[in-house]
Image (cartoon, rainbow, N blue to C red):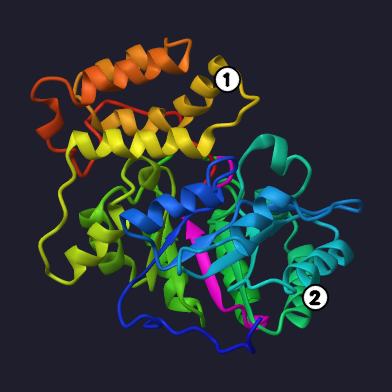
Amino acid sequence: MTPREPLSANTFGRATTALAPMQDVTTIGFMRIFASFGAPDWFFTEFFRVHATSTLDENTLACITQNDTGRPVFAQIIGEDIAHMVRTTRELLRHSVAGIDLNLGCPAPKVFRKNVGGGLLRDLRHVDALLGELRNATPGLLSVKTRIGFDDADRASTLLDLVALTNKHAIDLLTIHGRTVRGLYRTPVDYTAIAHAVSLSQCPVLANGDISSATKAAHVLASTGCAGVMLGRHAVRNPWVFRQIREHLAGKPVFQPHLSDVREYIDRLVNITASPSLPTQLHASRMKKFLNFIGTGVDPEGAFLKVVRRASTLAELLLLCDIHLIHGTRAAHPFPAEAYPGITARPNCE
């Protein structure tokens, strides 16, 4: 890891973009797809779960050691034991990481109930101690990804106190998902809270949560004053979105994908999720995780989503993709920048 040079709001001379870390989604294969369609400025790995007997997950580590996307990769860690978090940080720093990212925001109940991820927002004294030790162990960039609080009762004070802690420990980057941990993905994103954090933070802030298109990204950037945006499930739906954001902000023509492009994207997803030992039914289930999001932009009636969710084999699934995406005149149909109103996906952690 190179010596630390604190980030500034204009590190890239423009707004920064990042792909959110999503468990079982943000693999090296997925990063390579984005590199070919229009990569974000930064990638973040799925979290490395840290505990007394933990080792570095090989598949997650491949996102660093085998990364040929040309983009820097932050290694995200999640855990509560300070000594082992420091141990894992030092192990990761032996590799070519852009920085270490601390997960303080994962809202999955099975995660926060173990007092990790978003669960740590209930114990800011422990966060204070953890950040101090991670800062001492990290000569390069150290970032934090969080939510605006654990629940509505404490959200205002938690966010203010957390920003104060990131200032105290000279954190280099703060990413804020504008919902509480308890809010999961159901509640509206509070961009006003993000803007307040931006006004108090001594480091650049990335806004996260429901940033669904280049137009939405521009609106969030303008309304919050943040240094950039992080996208998760909306990038799963539209892998060209980072390219589109850069084009939109530069005042250039914005790339318009068509359903034929989406079909090509799906083939690439099939390739990165394939395994010789994987039964076709399980491969189909793995693909549905992605099609769940892609399908929100295929047709306004949600017909595509309805049929693919019932498919039982990969062959059946791909036939349905052909019918709805490239048969007849469908191939030339534009793929919309936003999901169709009323057509919803089942969200992943972001």
- Quarter where residue 295 is shown: top left
Q: Is residue 229 above or below residue 319?
A: below
**What are the residue bounds of the magenta stretch?**
168-182
Q: Residue furthest right?
A: 52
Q: Residues within 10 Å of mark 2 (few under 14, many from 20)?
A: some
Q: Mark 2 or 1 closer to N-term?
A: 2
Q: Is residue 252 magenta?
A: no
Left or right placement of residue 69 versus residue 282 in this view: left
Q: CA distance from mark 2 to mark 1?
A: 42 Å
- How far from the left and from the top, in percent, is residue 212? 30, 47
Task: Indicate the quadrant containing the N terminus: top left, top right, bottom left or bottom right.
Answer: bottom right
On the image, numbered disc 2 is attached to which residue?
133
- How far from the left and from the top, in percent, is residue 296? 29, 30
Residue 69 numbered tag: none
On the image, numbered disc 1 is attached to which residue?
282
The answer to whether one can see residue 302 in this image is no
Which element type, helix, strand or loop, lies under badge 2?
helix
Which element type, helix, strand or loop, lies under badge 1?
helix
The answer to whether one can see residue 349 in this image is yes
Name the magenta segment's main secondary structure.
loop
- Quarter where residue 207 is shown: bottom left
Which residue is painted at 54% across and 87% down in the image?
6
- Which of 36 and 14 lies nearest the eye of the viewer? 36
Q: Is residue 185 above or below residue 9?
A: above
